[in-house]
Amino acid sequence: MLSGVHVAVLGETEHLPEDLCRAFTGVVSVRHIRIRPREAVTIGKATVAIIDADKVASFTPEDIADLVQNQINPVRPFIFVGDTKSRAPLAANNLLRFGSFVFRPFLTTSLLDLVQFLSGQPRAEDPSTSGEARPAWVVDEHALAMSAGERALGALFSFAKGQSPLKQPDLIKAGDLLIGSLAEGGLNSWVRGVRQHHDRTYQHCLLVAGLAVGFGLKLQFRESDLLLVAKGALLHDLGKARVPLEILDKPGALTEVESAMMRKHPVYGEEALRLESGIEPELLRVVRSHHEFLDGSGYPDGLLGERIDDLVRLTTIADIVAALIEQRPYKAALSGEAAFDVLAGMHGKVDIAIAKALAPLGRLI
Ligand SMILES: [Fe+2]
Ligand SMILES: [Fe+2]
């Protein structure tokens, strides 16, 4: 049991939802509280309150605002748990600035980490004195997602070098957090944040991951597909762990030999992952085929379009946009809009329908 952590779960249903029951029973002290619109709530000693956003069907946004602002917010931190459909109206009504949001289906470890983190945070100030400022305990979702992404990449690269086993939960957790932090339209600040990263390969992988998830959200991918997008993008350049640093970080253009070495990274990455159990075949394809072009001019297999699936196409587009907007010692960074212009000229090579649908995002990055 986590000592000193007490969770109150609020919803209109009789019983604690099954996934929350599984996550908390035997780990933290948990109390289920049945709530009704416009009725006062007694939360007791809970250190964190959780509102089951999927189980407040008869609450209007105003009712939720009242619950959050007048009954919970001055008392303790809270988390909304729900699916992507629940998040949109909460975001539209600006309610998410008061708390964090965890997507269903969630990873138990991610939820418990957040609950534990919030339990240790100072209580919010009296709202009458804090004005519009965000309460101190509101988690910076981007910072959480970025550090989870860095941790996952560190583990992935050391796995690819044969130094440690693959930690799939880390990858899933990073993917989860990434989706959560971008779902409110945070593409711009993600891109700005990533640009501060000191390691070029990490910076690139985090950028591709943020772009791919932002693109998947724009194309209204299902939650399960979004997680595949996030994981695939974090993994896509895994094979670079086996390419010498002098080539990866070379300030100028590569020689023919160096470039041949560099072009092996998709195969190295797939080789490293292929023997692992539980890796989705779609992810192996992203890693191996993200440099393929629809006209067969890509590498390593020269695949033609019909053999390149949507997840790979999306990752390829995110990879190209990332490379164009990245600053390199030998080239200036393009703006997001200019990057999409370049993409629009890549007829026959990339999926132009996808590129067109995403072009409006160009001014956000
Ligand atoms: Fe690559
Ligand atoms: Fe890449």
Image: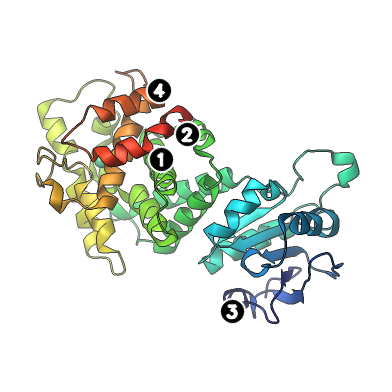
Q: Give the distance between the C-alpha atoms of the residues marked 1 and 3, in whole angstroms.
A: 33 Å
Q: Nearer the viewer, mark 2 or mark 3?
A: 3
Identity, as a three-letter code, of the amino acid under mark 2: Val
On the question of residue 352 being in view, the answer is yes
**Where residue 365 sits in the image (x, y, percent)?**
45, 30
* Residue 241 circle label: none
> Of callouts 4 and 3, which one flags the residue occurring earlier in the amino acid sequence?
3
Q: Percent from the top left, x then y, of residue 104?
A: 53, 65
Placement of 47 over or under 30, stated as above or below: above
Dot 1 falls on a residue whose secondary structure is: helix
Q: Which residue is mark 4?
A: 335
Provide the residue designation for mark 3: 18
Element type at marker 2?
Answer: helix
Question: Can residue 327 be seen at all in this image of the molecule?
Answer: no
Give the residue type at disc 4. Ser
Q: Earlier in the sequence, mark 4 or mark 2?
A: 2
Residue 227 picture location, percent across and down: 41, 57
Left or right, residue 14 beside residue 23:
right
Tell me the residue that label 2 is attached to: 191
Query: Which residue is depicted at the point 72% across and 75% down?
Result: 30
Q: Amino acid at mark 3?
A: Glu
Q: Are marks 2 and 1 in contact (CB under 8 Å)?
A: yes
Q: What amino acid type is highlighted by mark number 1?
A: Leu
Are the residues flagged by discs 4 and 3 in contact, CB closer than 8 Å?
no
Mark 2 or mark 3, earlier in chain: 3
| Alpha carbon separation for disc pair 2 and 1 | 8 Å
In which quadrant of the rendered view does residue 135 lie? top right
Q: Residues within 10 Å of mark 3 (few under 14, many from 20)?
A: few
Q: Which mark is residue 211?
A: 1
* Crowd class of label 1 (few under 14; some 14 to 19; many from 20; radius 10 Å): many
